[in-house]
Amino acid sequence: MDLIVCSRALAIRGVILTVFLSLWSQQISAQVSVVPIPKTVMVGENVLLSVSGVTGTILLFSWHKGERSTDKNQMLNYSPNTTPPEQIEEPYKGRVRVFPNCSMEILGVNTNDNGSYTVSIQTRGGQQQQQQATVTIIVYEKVSKPNVTSNLACPVEYKDSITLTCVTTNTTQIILWSKDSQKLPSDDRTSLSQENRTLTITNVSSADSGNYQCEVMNSVSHSTSDLYTLTVCYGPKNVKITPQGPITQPLKSQLTLNCMAESVPAPDYTWTLNGTIKGHEGKLVLTEITIHDQGNYTCEANNSVTQLSGSASVYVNVTGNAASGTDNGSGSLPGWAIAVIVIAILIVVALIAACVYYFLLRDKSKSNDISMKESTLNSRSDPHLRSSSKNPATTGEEVNYSEVTFKPGALKPTQPKLKENTTEYAEISRT
Ligand SMILES: *[C@@H]1O[C@H](CO)[C@@H](O)[C@H](O)[C@H]1NC(C)=O
Ligand SMILES: *[C@@H]1O[C@H](CO)[C@@H](O)[C@H](O)[C@H]1NC(C)=O
Ligand SMILES: *[C@@H]1O[C@H](CO)[C@@H](O)[C@H](O)[C@H]1NC(C)=O
Ligand SMILES: *[C@@H]1O[C@H](CO)[C@@H](O)[C@H](O)[C@H]1NC(C)=O
Ligand SMILES: *[C@@H]1O[C@H](CO)[C@@H](O)[C@H](O)[C@H]1NC(C)=O
Ligand SMILES: *[C@@H]1O[C@H](CO)[C@@H](O)[C@H](O)[C@H]1NC(C)=O
Ligand SMILES: *[C@@H]1O[C@H](CO)[C@@H](O)[C@H](O)[C@H]1NC(C)=O
């Protein structure tokens, strides 16, 4: 029982297989094929739709636009036995050439020629009287240079989303994006859509700033856009004043306060002292400082695009002592004053030197004996030594000495004297 069922099933299967095989062999024998030459066609080029595998004698063939052969979409027909053999429909006259081997050439293709073409052939003597084949050609354009545009000039950090668009006039193509010549970072804030035509970055951060580019390509050409520089606006962050406080500044000195902040675009600055506006630049210069310049200086940085602001403060303490120190570099005396002082000191020193020299010279001209003068100095410097060194040898000198002291008279009043000279000394003192 089982065996009978099984063999029946096999028999049915065999029949199906036979039918399929015979259909297949019929199709094989009837196979006409068409290939485009060249395989990829660019706008303006010619393409040959080359037919092969035709069996039997050709009686008539026709070409049709599309995947079916109807009268409506016929481009041309060709019968070898008529003169002229070909009959070409109006829009294709002059644009196509046809050959006895069933091939057709399209001259100077345009994007409208993109699509399928069907050839239908009647033969005598072949296994099939009617043979047919379809070919599809894809017409490529050379891509033109794309351009990147943006929906926002300067998106605000942690707030805005930005959409960059690769503007291209071409249709069939692949679009690739790059940032700073690298592949796009793949994070969940970055997304592509519309066949990569648009690039969207949500909740931008300053790290998204950079040079973006898109490249369009098809099988035959590619082109890259110019760089689009994306600038993300942020800040102000880290508002800072230099020099750092607290600052002690002498009266009448000069002080420059600098305010800095990290910000795109550059911020507007406002300086205030105890709440009163003092300036609108990054730099605040205080000259000839008075006690009214003392207080708490605040710099506020304001970013007009992000609508954010930040501030920093520094206390400037003005000390009463104008001459004291140059703590902050800018409080010193002016250069000319220093120069005047130095010159004055030099003149005084020179005068003193000149006086000393003058008197020395005069002393010399008045004394004939240098050794004698030395003893004078000795005696002057230490009268006790003088009295202790009293001996016969020096006595002669003593005499000499007395003589000298007589000569200058009033000029040398302070001569320590020996017992005999005491009277002389008294005399001189009186004059
Ligand atoms: C058909 O004829 C054209 C023109 O002579 C030739 O270029 C083409 O190669 C031929 N096609 C085949 C399949 O022989
Ligand atoms: C050409 O045809 C192909 C398929 O037939 C299609 O995918 C493509 O978009 C067409 N291209 C043009 C430029 O029409
Ligand atoms: C944007 O990103 C910042 C930092 O990653 C995050 O703190 C903030 O919540 C995000 N904002 C939105 C709207 O997603
Ligand atoms: C889109 O871009 C991705 C890479 O970012 C690429 O793999 C893909 O082929 C592109 N698709 C199209 C249609 O251009
Ligand atoms: C600012 O306030 C300080 C005290 O905080 C005061 O010493 C100073 O004189 C004030 N300066 C001005 C210009 O009002
Ligand atoms: C200066 O002013 C700022 C802002 O008004 C305040 O935060 C800071 O404490 C003040 N500093 C001094 C030393 O008064
Ligand atoms: C200013 O400096 C003087 C002298 O150094 C000091 O006594 C005073 O406390 C300072 N004032 C402030 C507000 O820092």
Image (cartoon, rainbow, N blue to C red):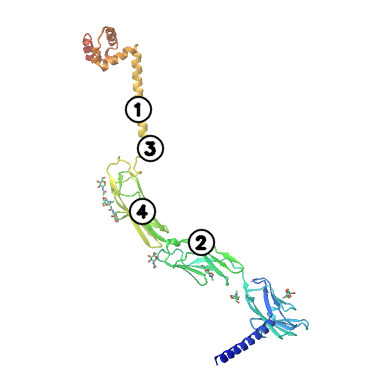
Give the left or right position of residue 181, taking residue 265 as reference: right
Q: Compare marks 3 and 4 and give the one earlier in the sequence.
A: 4
Residue drawn at 36 percent across, 60 percent down: 309
Residue 280: horizontal and vertical position, in percent?
Answer: 37, 54
101 over 13 or under it: above or below: above
Mark 1 or mark 3: which is in front?
A: 1
Quadrant for the N terminus in the image: bottom right
Mark 2 or mark 1: which is in front?
A: 2
The CA distance from mark 4 to mark 2 is: 35 Å
Residue bearing mark 3 = 336
Using the rendered view, name the quadrant where residue 27 is placed.
Answer: bottom right
- Mark 4 lies within 8 Å of ligand 6 (Cβ measured): no
- Mark 3 lies within 8 Å of ligand 7 (Cβ measured): no
The CA distance from mark 1 to mark 4 is: 49 Å
Check whether the beta carbons of the residues at disc 1 and disc 4 lie within 8 A of each other.
no
Q: Compare marks 4 and 2 and give the one earlier in the sequence.
A: 2
Residue bearing mark 1 = 349
Residue bearing mark 4 = 240
Type of amino acid under label 4 = Lys
Mark 3 or mark 4: which is in front?
A: 4
Q: Compare marks 1 and 4 and give the one earlier in the sequence.
A: 4
Give the left or right position of residue 74, taking residue 232 as reference: right
Along the line of sight, which residue is nearer the eye, 212 or 264?
Answer: 212
Residue 257: horizontal and vertical position, in percent?
Answer: 35, 50
Residue bearing mark 2 = 182
Type of amino acid under label 1 = Val
Assign a secondary structure to mark 2. Answer: strand
The CA distance from mark 2 to mark 3 is: 60 Å
Estimate how packed mark 3 is, as few (under 14), some (14 to 19) or many (20 or more) residues with alpha carbons within 10 Å: few
